[in-house]
Amino acid sequence: MSADLHDVPGLGTPADTEWETVVGLEVHAELATATKLFSASPNRFGGDPNTHIDPVSLGLPGSLPVINEEAVNLAIRVGLALNCQVQTSVFARKHYFYPDMPKNFQISQYDHPINVDGWLELPSGKRIGIERAHLEEDTGKTAHVGGGGRIHEAGYSLVDYNRAGVPLIEIVGGPDLRSAEEARQYVTELRAILVAVGASDGKMEEGSLRVDCNVSVRPEGTNRLGTRCEIKNVNSLRSMGRAIDYEARRQIDLLTSGQLVEQQTRHWNEDEGRTHALRSKEEDYDYRYFPEPDLLPLVISDHKVAQIQNELPPLPQDLRRNLAKAAPSVDADLIGLIVERGLYDLALAAFDQTSGNLRAIKRLRNHFAHDLAGGHGSLLAKALIDLVNMEEAGDLTATQAKKVLAVLVESGGSPQDAAQELGFEAMDTGELESLVDSLIAEHAEEWSRFCDGDGKLTGFFVGQVMRATQGRADGKVVTQLLNSRRG
Ligand code: MN
C-alpha cells in the first residue's frame, strides 16, 4: 500500500469499526415564475411537447438572453430565508453535451453565486450549513421510445424543450447531515421554506424539487471526510433515504475489505434497491466555465435586499417557536408535524381556547398527532374545540370523535350536526344502567367470575354492551358501572 493510502479514512479498518455517514445535499428547485429565466416563454409544467419554446430556449444562433427580474427576486427571498449573504453575482457558461441542452452549455453561476454562507435550522435545532444558492437554467427532457424507456434498449429518442430555460435555484448544503433521517428532515424543512416564501411549489413528483446526495463514510470520531459519491435520480424522500443507506453500506464494505471508494456519480435504481456507477465524478475544470458574455454581472442594491427581507413571511421555524410558546405541553416532534402539515393556524387557535385544561389539551394533542395527517380540510378551530368539549362532557367516545372529526375535515360544519348525522346520540345514563343490569342477569356465570376478580370478563361485558348499543356507549363509563355493581 503506498504511503498516501494510509490517509484514506477507514481503509482496511476492522469489521467492528463504528462508522459515521456523512451526507451533503444539492437541491435543485424550479422557481415559480410566470416565464423562463432568459425569455418570455411560459414556465409551466406539462403541455404538449415543444409548445413552451422560443429562439432563446432553443439556443438558436443570434438569440440573446434577458434576465427575468422575478426569478432574481425569488432567488433573493430563498437566500435570505436561508440566512445567506446576498452578493453581486456573475453568470457563467457550464459546458457539457446533452441532446436536451441545445446550446451545449448551461447558463449557471460559478465563482460568484448570488447567495452564499447561510444555514438552515432543522426542527431539532441543529444547523446545517448552506454553502451557496445560485441561479441557473433548467434543461429540456429526452424521452427514450421503446425498450421500456431505457436509453440502451430504446429504438429512438425524442426531445422536449418545454423545460429548457426554466429558472432553477441550486441550493448546496454543507456535509453536515449524519444519517438518512437527518437528510429527510433537511429536505422536508427546505421544501417548507421554499413553499413558505412562494419560491417553489416543492413538488418532488413533478420534478420541481430534485435532490442529489453526496454520501461518504468515515470511522466515528475522525474528522477528515472520506471520498464521496454523488447519487442522482432520487425521486422521493423514501428513495432518498434508501439510497443513502445503501450507499453508506456499500462504501463501508469496500473500506473494511481494503478497497478504495472511487469518486463517482452513481444512479439510484429504485426497483433493484441499489446504486450503480454512471461515470467518474467530473471536476469543475471539466466544465470549462467562463463568464457568460451575453449577460452583465447582477448587481443588487442594499435597498432591494432590505425590502425583500422586510416582505419575508414567517418561516416554518418561526411558526414552530410561536406554537411552542402557545402550547408548552406539546412536544417538539408534534409541533414539527403540525407545522409541516399546514395545521399551524388551526393549532394556534385551538390550543389558545383550551385555557389550560390539561385533559382537553391531551385530546387535542391526540387529534393533531393521529387524526389530521392529511391536513385540516374544511375543519375550523371552533368546531375542533366544540368536538373536544363534547368528548369532555361524555357526549362522544374517543372512537366516535375520530369519526366525527373525519366528517368535519371532509365537509366542515359543526360536530353536533355531524354526530347526529352519524347517529352518535349521547347515551342516556339510565338507559345504559338498565342495559348493564339486564346483561348481568343474562350472563350470571360470567358475572360471578367477574366478581371473583377475573379481569378478562371486563372485556366480555363491555363487548356485550357495545354490540347492543352499536358502539354508542362509552367503554369507560360501562367499566365504571360494572365495578359499581360488583360492590
Ligand atoms: Mn445545477
Image (cartoon, rainbow, N blue to C red):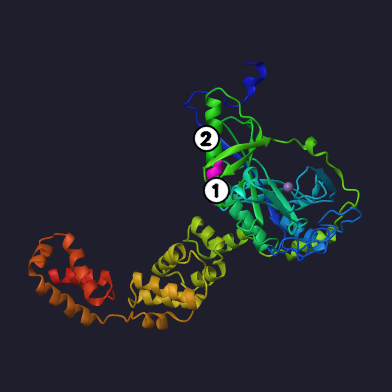
**Count of marks, rendered view:** 2
Looking at the image, residue 476 lies above or below residue 199:
below
Residue 366 part of the magenta-drawn span: no
Q: Element type at marker 2?
A: helix
Residue 7 as seen in the image, left or right of residue 135: left
Q: Nearer the viewer, residue 233 or 398?
A: 233
Residue visible at 78% across and 43% down in the picture: 97
Answer whether labels 2 and 1 touch (C-beta < 8 Å). no
Indicate the amino acid at tag 1: Ser
Give the amino acid at mark 2: Arg
Q: Secondary structure at mark 1?
A: helix
Residues shaded magenta = 238-244
Q: CA distance from mark 2 to mark 1?
A: 15 Å
Report the residue marked by disc 1.
239
Category of crowding for the residue at label 1, using alpha-carbon neighbours closer than 10 angstroms: few (below 14), some (14–19), many (at least 20): some
In the picture, the disc for residue 249 is: 2
Q: Position of residue 275 (x, y in %)?
A: 57, 39
Tell me the number on the disc at residue 444.
none
Task: Determine the image quadrant of residue 444.
Answer: bottom left
User: Which residue is at 75% across, 50% downward?
Assistant: 100
Q: Write down the quadrant of residue 465 in the picture.
A: bottom left
Q: Quadrant of the C terminus?
A: bottom left
Measuring from the top left, give residue 12's x and y in whole percent.
55, 22
